[in-house]
Every structure is written in C-alpha cells, then in structure tokens.
Image (cartoon, grey):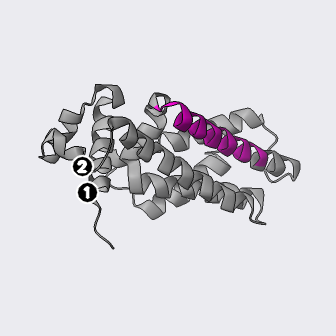
Amino acid sequence: MKPESRKQEIVNAAAILFKEKGYSAVTMRDLATAMGIKAASLYNHIQSKQEILSTIIIELAEEFTTGMNLIVNSDQSAIRKLENIISLHIDVTLRNADGLASLNNDWMHLEEENLLSFEKMRNDYEENFRQIVRKGVDAKEIKSNNIEIIVFSTLSTLRTLYLWYPKQKNIDAGILKKDMIAVLLQGVV
C-alpha cells in the first residue's frame, strides 16, 4: 500500500472535522490545529476549504457512479444487482465513513459546477436504482410494493450506515453484508 500524500492527509483530517462539526463550522485554522501544522502550510497542498469539500464529495460520488454503472451494465438479475449495490455501500462506508458524512450532509455547500455535477450523479444513481427495482418488480423477483417506498427505504438505510456502523463493536463486515442484504431484500418476517 502506498503512503498517503500530504494532500490526502489533509482531506482525511478535514473529513473527520466536517463530520464532527459540519463544513460551515470548520476553519482552515481548525484543520491546521488538528494536523499539528500552521494554517499557511495547508496552502502548499490545497487551494481552499472548498477544494477539500469538492475532493471528498466528488471522489465518493464518482466511486458510487462507477460501481452503479458496472452493476447496471451487468447481466445479473435485479436481486443480484441490489445485493451488489448494498455491498457497494457497505464497502464504501467501511473505507470512508467520515467522507460519507460530507457527501450526505455538506453537499449543498459545493460551488456551482461541482454542485451541478454532484446533483447529476446523485439523480442518475437514484434513477438507476429505481430502474433496477422496477425491472425486478416486472420480472416478479421483487414484491410489487410501491417502488418509491422501496427506493426511499433502502437508500435511506444505506446512506445513514456511516452514522451507525462505526459505533458497532461486535459486528464483523461479512456479517454486516450478509444480514443487511437479507433484511433489506427479504424483510424481517
């Protein structure tokens, strides 16, 4: 594994602070203090707090988009595609729970071009998810419940996993995937 660049260290430290305080409340001085360096030193590696936020959010959104595109373009059943989407969310959460806090809570602070790009990726992702569910209902793989409720309840659970999972001490990642897939796709009854 190659060592993190200084810029990546800054981004990771910022993600933690953004999760704890929210993007608006964090200053570059806070970030420098958390890293044990002078604020001016940060600017040798990044241009602004906005650049950090954009890096966090756009990189994660692109990771989800890439994963979704691979899943959508596969010739798997709708159920298998949904299992892969759940696994994708769990994998990203386990790797970057702090960054997901920014993706979910601070995206509206992105500047225009990045905001539009993020909103498009998010909307496309949700529409792809919706289409998978719709095809699963049409193929009788999925119960014909209201598609919007299925989309909302599943994605809401997956999007808030970053809040819940880090507090769990006794749930192995493999068990998390297996049981979350079972609960989200089969229910509890």
Q: Residue 185, how many percent across, how many down?
A: 66, 50
Position of residue 25 relative to residue 29, above or below, is above
State which quarter of the image contains the C terminus: top right
Q: Is residue 123 magenta?
A: yes
Q: Residue 38 got which mark?
A: none
Q: Residue 6 got which mark?
A: 1
Badge 1: how crowded within 10 Å, few (<14), some, or many (20+)? few
Q: Nearer the viewer, residue 92 or 149?
A: 92
Q: Is 57 left, or right, of 2 in this rendering?
A: right
Disc 1 versus disc 2: distance between alpha carbons? 10 Å
Q: Name the residue rendered at 67%, 62% in the picture.
A: 70
Q: Secondary structure at mark 1?
A: helix
Q: Name the residue rendered at 40%, 45% in the picture.
A: 99
Q: Secondary structure at mark 2?
A: loop
Q: Residue 44 got which mark?
A: 2
Q: Is 133 left, or right, of 166 in this rendering?
A: right
Badge 2: how crowded within 10 Å, few (<14), some, or many (20+)? few
Q: Main secondary structure of the magenta part?
A: helix
Q: Amino acid at mark 2?
A: Asn
The segment highlighted magenta reads 110-131
Q: Are marks 1 and 2 in contact (CB under 8 Å)?
A: yes
Residue 9 appears in the figure:
yes
Q: Residue 88, how many percent across, how many down?
A: 55, 57
Q: Name the residue rendered at 44%, 51% in the picture.
A: 93
Residue 164 appears in the figure:
no
